[in-house]
Amino acid sequence: MEGDLIRINEWLRPVAWLYGIGVRIRNWLFDVNILKSKSYDIPIIAVGNITVGGTGKTPHTEYLIRLLQERFQVAVLSRGYKRKSKGFVLAQTETPMQAIGDEPYQMRLKFPQIYVAVDKDRRHGIEQLCDNRVAPGTEVILLDDAFQHRYVKPGLSILLVDYHRLICDDALLPAGRLREPQSGKDRAGIVIVTKCPADINPIGFRVIKKALKLYPFQSLYFSTLKYGNLTSLSGGNTLPLNSLRNHRKVLLLTGIASPEQMKMDLEHYGADITPMPFGDHHFFTPADVARINETFAAMPAGSLIVTTEKDAARLKNLSGLSEGTKKALYVLPIEIEILRNQQQTFNQSIINYVLKNPRNSNLAEKQNDHNA
């Protein structure tokens, strides 16, 4: 149920109160225009959260890419967390994962026809993507994990809220996991409650809607995780999820913020899970590799290793993995699905925003064709 992953450190409430003062002052400085938010004449959609930990930013960003890429030239701009490069980097076919980070690398591999770039300075990154000498024809920019980056004023902000850790029940850092007071949600045009059970009942929807206390101008949607077939990291072989019950053990190897939902979902398919969690965006060391090899070698014959697409970006060219480990290592693709028969409504709202905020005459022509 919602709220089942919330743990509040009550003894840290006084520190959280002080932290909240600093965050509120920062937000006030932006609200009264002392600190400047810059707008751009191109459709910009920011996707993010106000909590520490995974709310499903990457699969939701990928959903938007799939929705828009057939009609518009899409560019994704990320900070490139834990990358080994500096400044603006526009991913090319040969760009290594270390230069842009695991999530941008994953998106570049999956969507080769879009632009994927990283830059800690989001303003500079946007300006580069709007330069036809750098990224010709960019028509819409998706800002990954940028809800709190207030130096940019996106045309549309999408706030993601974890079903298992609703912001209305959480507390500010370090007592809880909120980066800013829950009133920060008021900047969102769209709020999506993520990681919902696929069979959530109508009462659950109404309870969450009432608890979030959104304004009339804000749209609320609910999404659930949807998994594809397991794919061998070495390539070629695939396995349906319902085959997991035929394997004696599954080593769940993750370096993501919140692996609990994934574990519960795989157990639903009959998997007997042995979790091996690492920190979010963890770069595997030789000691980690040795531990993975040893743990898997001690498991019964026929066992599998399952990991995420994000972790696969860091594991793919990792040296030291044993042959047995490599052969047993499978990647679990994750997508999202909009619930309550609202997928078409959500899709149309995104497309309409892009069409109504064209960058140039080409996009305006597309709008006219759409209206016709």
Image: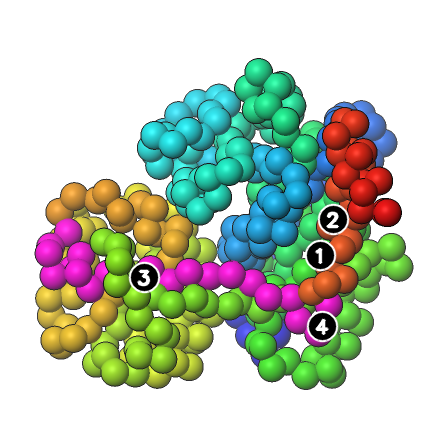
Q: Alpha-carbon distance for marks 4 and 2?
A: 18 Å
Mark 2, Cα crowd under 10 Å, few <14 / some 14-19 / many 20+, is some
Q: Can the viewer see residue 242 in this picture? A: yes
Per the image, label 1 sits on a secondary structure element best described as: helix
Which circle's residue, 3 or 2, is located before the other in the chain? 3
Distance (Cα) linking label 3 and label 4 = 29 Å
Residue 126 visible? The answer is no
Assign the N terminus to one quadrant of the image. Answer: bottom right
Q: Name the residue under label 1.
A: 347
Secondary element under disc 4, as helix, strand or loop, is: loop
CB atoms of marks 1 and 4 within 8 Å: no
Determine whether label 3 and label 1 are within 8 Å by CB. Answer: no
Q: In front: 66, or 181?
A: 66
Question: Label for residue 341?
Answer: 4
Amino acid type at circle 1 is Asn
Q: Do the residues labelled 3 and 4 touch (CB within 8 Å)?
A: no
How many residues crowd mark 3 within 10 Å: few (<14), some (14–19), many (20+)? many
Kindly check if marks 1 and 2 are in contact, taking CB atoms under 8 A apart as contact. yes
Q: Distance between the residues labelled 1 and 2?
A: 6 Å
Residue 141 point in image, percent of width and height: 64, 36
Task: Give the mark, 1 or 4, whose residue is nearer the N terminus.
Answer: 4
Residue behind mark 2: 351
What is the magenta range?
321-342
